[in-house]
Structures are given as C-alpha cells and as structure tokens.
Amino acid sequence: MQAQAHVFRVALTGDFFRRDGSPLYNDIGTRVLDEQPGIEYAAFAEHRREIDPDQIGGAQAVVVLSPRVTTHSLSQSENLLAICRFGVGYDSVDVPACTAADVALITAVGAVDRSVAEATVGWMLALTHHIRTKDLLVREGRWNERSQFMGRELRERTLGIVGMGGIGRAVVKLLAGFGMRQPLAFDPYLDPAVAAEMGVRLVPLDELLASADFVSVHCPLNETTRGLLGRRELGLMRPEAYLINTARGGIIDEDALAEVLSEKRIAGAALDCFVGEPLLAPPRFAEFDNVLLAPHSIAWTDEMFRDIGETICTAAVELALGRRPRGVVDADVLDHPGFQQKWQRLRLG
C-alpha cells in the first residue's frame, strides 16, 4: 500500500524496547524525528532475529539494532527507501540485496568513535595492570599473592592498530598523553600522508604483529578481513603482547586464539565480539584468567546510543526532505532510477 504523501514513516526494530513497550535505553535520538513535521515513527510489535517484510509494512525507513536484513526482508520494498543501521558495522545486512531492491543502507558514521576508543584504552589499562586478577585476590583472600602480578605502564610501549578508521584515530588521540611510542597501523586503504599527519607509522600486518605490545582490531568484517588474524599471524605476536578486539567476531580465528592463549604465547586478550553471537553459554575463553570478555557492548554508553540515534535519525530526516544523507554505504543506489522514482513519490513536500 502506498504511503500517504504528507507522512514519512520510520519504523524501529523491536529490540529497542521491552516486551511491555517501555524503552530499554535512556535516549536513542528520536527527538530528531519528533522535531520534524510530517514524520511518524513506531516500533515493530515484536523482535525477530531476521526482519520479515510484514514488519516493515509501509515504512519508508527502518532503524535496525540487531536483526539481520536479507533478500527476504526486502522482498516487498516498494515503499522502503532506507535501512538505517544503528551503529557503524553492517555485516548483518545484505548490502547487494539492498542495492537490488533500491534501498539505501545508512550507518551512523563517526557516532561510536569516542566510546569505542575509551573502551579500548580502558581495556589496555585493565590488561596490563592485571585489574581483574587483583580484584579477585582481594575477593578470595589471596592478598599475599600480589607480588606475582606486577603490572606494566603504557609508557614506552607500542600500540598496533588494525584498521585506521574513525575509531582507530580516536584511540590514537586519547593515548597521546600516556608517553607511548609512535603507534603502528595496518590499513591498506589509508594514505601514507594522512597517516603521517596523525602521527602513526603504516607498516605491513606481519611487522605490526611482531612489534606491538597491544594489537587492537578496528577494521570491518568483510570477505577481505574474515580470518585476517589466523594461526600464522597470531604466532607472530610477542609473549608480552595483548590482543584486543572491539570490531567483529570472525576477523580473528578463535581456534587459533585459544591455542596461543593455552600455550601462553601471548600475554592475554580482551574480546567484545565473537563468532555465532549471541553466546548463550560460557565460551571457551572464559577459562582464561588473562582474558577479559564483554557481550558485544563494552563501548555501550548513554552518550554513544544518543549520538548514534541522533546521527541515524538525522539521516532519515534528510532522506524525508529529499536531501542526500551522510553515511550511505551503497551511495550509488541514490541515483538508481528505481530509487529516484520511489524517493520522488515518498519524500515530504
């Protein structure tokens, strides 16, 4: 059914809300939609792991937290202009399916940089100062074991960043006052001149792994990066080095990581993301005292959700007003004749 010309409808997936309809989060930026005449928004009646076309109904944009978006999801998309991913990763969205359906995929570019960077630095400090272990020493009455867990400062140590996008750059800025050595970065898409301006040294991945005290992963998951850090690559890391992953499960070979941890060939790890999420039973990494774990939410803060929401809702408003929004992944789709025809019919005014 064609949407009314004077209303632009935005739908939110059900996982933003509890079963009674109350919001799970303090602020997801919907005030941006409230402030724009002609826009209405509502939540899906229920949460499903994959979006079904009947949930989309007559919406022009869908703000998606965790459900997958597939070819099936978009099989009735004659009135749908955009999938608005509540975050910056989009491995749960079939991008070619969006393009084929003349649906733009929009992400919240830049909105998570500060929060993920803070979480990364926090984990670096927690790992190298053995914070988890020292907490347990007190809780378990093992005070006299404290001398066995001498920490090390960040000073004079080297950070290696895999993927120098907005998050990696924010990490470098936050660490500027810690007296660390020049950061190393592996990013085949980064201009060396830009890297030099940021104060990082671009190196091959093998050199980064062999030289860094902390290897922090900040690249997207795609066919190029899937399994990027496997048995050979992890074997290059130093025994004193830590591995941090706040990006996506699948970039690191989990079997290989479990192996190097078991054999104490690296000092430890901090993992926010895993293959096969959500994990509803303790993963194999729970057995390691030198591993910190989080349920893909280490960077979740009220500020981050507000910023993501405002960014993605602003993009929806821009689309409703006939303006090209920021953060479109498949940017060429905006010029497809099929998309242009829908846009002309469904935008406000």
Image (cartoon, rainbow, N blue to C red):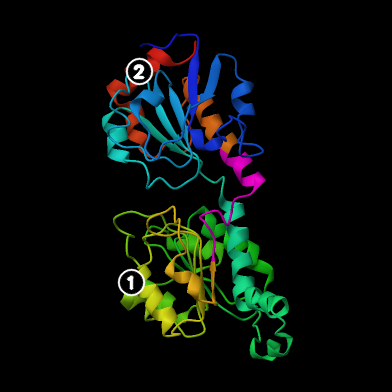
Tell me what residue is drawn at x 50 percent, y 80 percent.
241
Name the residue nearer the viewer: 325 or 303.
Answer: 303
Tell me what residue is drawn at x 29 percent, y 26 percent.
336
Q: Tell which circle, 2 or 1, labels the residue nearer the N-terminal end.
A: 1
Asked if residue 296 lies in the magenta stretch, the reply is yes
Which residue is label 2 attached to? 342
Residue range in magenta is 293-308
Whether residue 136 can be seen here: yes
Tell me what residue is drawn at x 65 percent, y 67 percent.
176
- The percent position of residue 59, horizontal first and vertical second, equals 43, 21
Crowdedness of circle 2 by 10 Å Cα count: few (<14), some, many (20+)?
A: some
Crowdedness of circle 1 by 10 Å Cα count: few (<14), some, many (20+)?
A: some
Q: Is residue 194 left or right of residue 36?
A: left
- Choose top left, top right, bottom left or bottom right for residue 73: top left
Q: Amino acid at mark 2?
A: Lys
- The percent position of residue 269, horizontal first and vertical second, equals 50, 72
Tell me what residue is drawn at x 68 percent, y 89 percent.
145
> Is residue 112 positioned above or below 161 on the image?
above
Disc on res. 230: 1
Q: Nearer the viewer, mark 2 or mark 1?
A: 1
Cα separation between marks 2 and 1: 45 Å
